[in-house]
Amino acid sequence: MSDYIIETHDLTKRYGNQISVSHLNIHVKKGRIYGLLGRNGAGKTTTMRMLLGLTAPTSGEVTIFGKHFQGNEKKILPRIGCLIESPGFYPNLTGTENLKIFATLRGLKNPKYIKNALELVNLPYRDKKLFSQYSLGMKQRLAIALAVMHNPELLILDEPINGLDPIGIAEVRDFIRELCDASGKTILISSHILSEISLLADDVGIIDHGKLLEEESLKELEAKNAKFIHFCVSDAQKAAQIITTTFSSKDIRLADANNLYLYNTTLPVAKINRSFIEAGIDIQEAHLCEDTLEDYFKKITGGEGIA
Amino acid sequence: MLNLIRCEFWKLKRKMFVQLVLAASFLFPIPLTAIIYYLNTAQDKYATKAAAFDALWQSVIGFGMLLLLPCILGIVAALLFFMERDNDTFKNLRTIPITSSQMVVAKCIVLLLFSVVFCISSTVASILCGFAFFGVTDVLFKILFSAVYGLLIAFSALPLVLLIVFFSRSYIFSIMLCVFYSVFNLLATFSMTALPKWLVLTLPTPSIMMWGTQQMASRIAVNDTEDLQNFIQMGLIPSTPQLIITLGLIGAVSLLLAVYLYKKRSE
Ligand SMILES: Nc1ncnc2c1ncn2[C@@H]1O[C@H](COP(=O)(O)OP(=O)(O)O)[C@@H](O)[C@H]1O
Ligand SMILES: [Mg+2]
């Protein structure tokens, strides 16, 4: 039918009269990392819960592995590994014992599965420490171990780096990348942290107030961003005049007395600099800048910065 | 299903659960032994030492199994049924996938096993006391019969499971619910003759008690033979199929509703 691993059609969830997810159509391609980006409360978790059958959609459909999700849960779910919101484990058991319960229920008899999964996330196997004594980062790691333990084809990870320290984040990022590149897994990952998505995802879906605003590859998204040259000079007014007259470009913005932005990046920067110096303008800085994804994200969600 | 039940037991690790239940089963046999020992030596109430033991065992059934056990089962049920909710593990189980009905059935089977273990352990405790102070006869029958009691009482506790899942509140609230349920059942048992017959025959605890007493009558020394005759004449004693049907119906309805509610609560 289609080569999408996950496809949704007008997926909608309504809680009371609040619409959490509205007519969502996402398309996750095989062997790629899809980043679902949205602010807190945008509907990322709700979407993922519906993909896993944890919450029934109000309307709309989910297709996973080319099959309708509803009615095929028993066939589809074992092929998925997931982490939804906070890690949920039994506090009176150790990490290994916790995984043993879920491995047993999945029919994985060989303790190797547990051992490998724990190794992958850098947790000790057969440690004495109880889950209740785990730090937030360790809990999150255990949840990731649970998601990958049975070697699923598709991973659905809801904010997997929550609670990890910067080194942990980098480790998890590398190993998610590795899972995708080396084992050809398809991964759907959500985050409210834009830099995470831009570092990891191949495709990006931006969701806000339950609606999908954009869906495209990261490359396309980056290409959309404006590039400009930022001059920091002693007299910005005069510098602007020079650019408009000598280089006949009106594509500039005067920020204040010292800062000038030039949006036409094809102009010869070296020559501009020389003209400035000849006109007696001191140049403190001049560099090529790119609008960050964050600026773009702010623009399309029409909101303030994201936490 | 076997795996699910095994996992339910693993989840109880370090909660001292089995130990506490076993300890609770010794709660009544010990003081009751003291009382009956006193009655026997000071007042010469029982004809033989074996009769004294039979009296002990019957009061252990009355207090330990019919009164205390439903409370304990309610607490165990609250623990089992709140576990996934409190630890947020529903999502991990549901995505395996394990259905809500599988979870409920597994938890109820664990409950049933606890019930049987408690009853057998109660009887063993009485027998130990009995060997020390009285004479014990018919050991095997008594142990088997207590296992049957455990099974029946587990069924009679299923409405309690339903209530606990329905309210899905705190542990304290559930314990109160259990105590209320037990006291209510006990009151019904005491005032049996005053209640309408259909009610006595549908309430689980009086039914089990009456049925049990009649079944045991031929094997042990029953104190109040006249009372028993009275009850038989009043038709307050259910036959075996009658008991199975009553408990089966109550159990089945409770279980179905509990599955439905548990599923709703987990979303
Ligand atoms: N069980 C629920 N009942 C009512 N509202 C809910 C429920 N779950 C989520 N919501 C609402 O749905 C919206 C989206 O939530 P969520 O999907 O958790 O956002 P995100 O994961 O993107 O931060 C929020 O406004 C939240 O309040
Ligand atoms: Mg969320």
Image: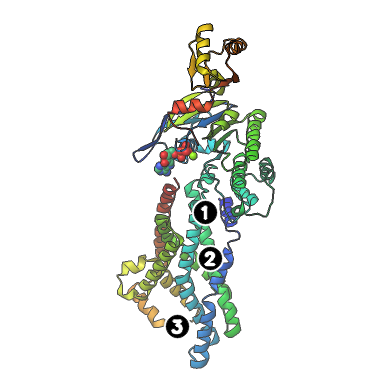
Discs 2/1, front:
1
Secondary element at tag 2:
helix
- Tell me what residue is drawn at x 67 percent, y 46 percent: A123
**Position of A286 relative to A156 (above/below):** above
Is residue B136 in view? no
- Tell me, yes or no, whether dots 2 and 1 are on the same chain: yes
Q: Are marks 3 and 1 on the same chain?
A: yes
Question: Disc 3 to disc 2, how far (Cα)?
Answer: 26 Å
Which one is earlier in the sequence, the residue at label 3 or at label 2?
2
**Image quadrant in which you'd find residue A166:** top right
Near-viewer residue (B249 or A298): A298
Q: Which residue is under mark 3?
A: B223
Quickly name the residue at label 1.
B106
Along the viewing direction, whichever of B99 and A125 lies nearer the viewer: A125
Q: Earlier in the sequence, mark 3 or mark 1?
A: 1
Q: Chain of mark 1?
A: B
Whole-angstrom CA distance, mark 3 to mark 1, is 40 Å
Query: Which sits in the foreground, A192 or B72?
Result: A192
Picture quarter with ligand 1: top left
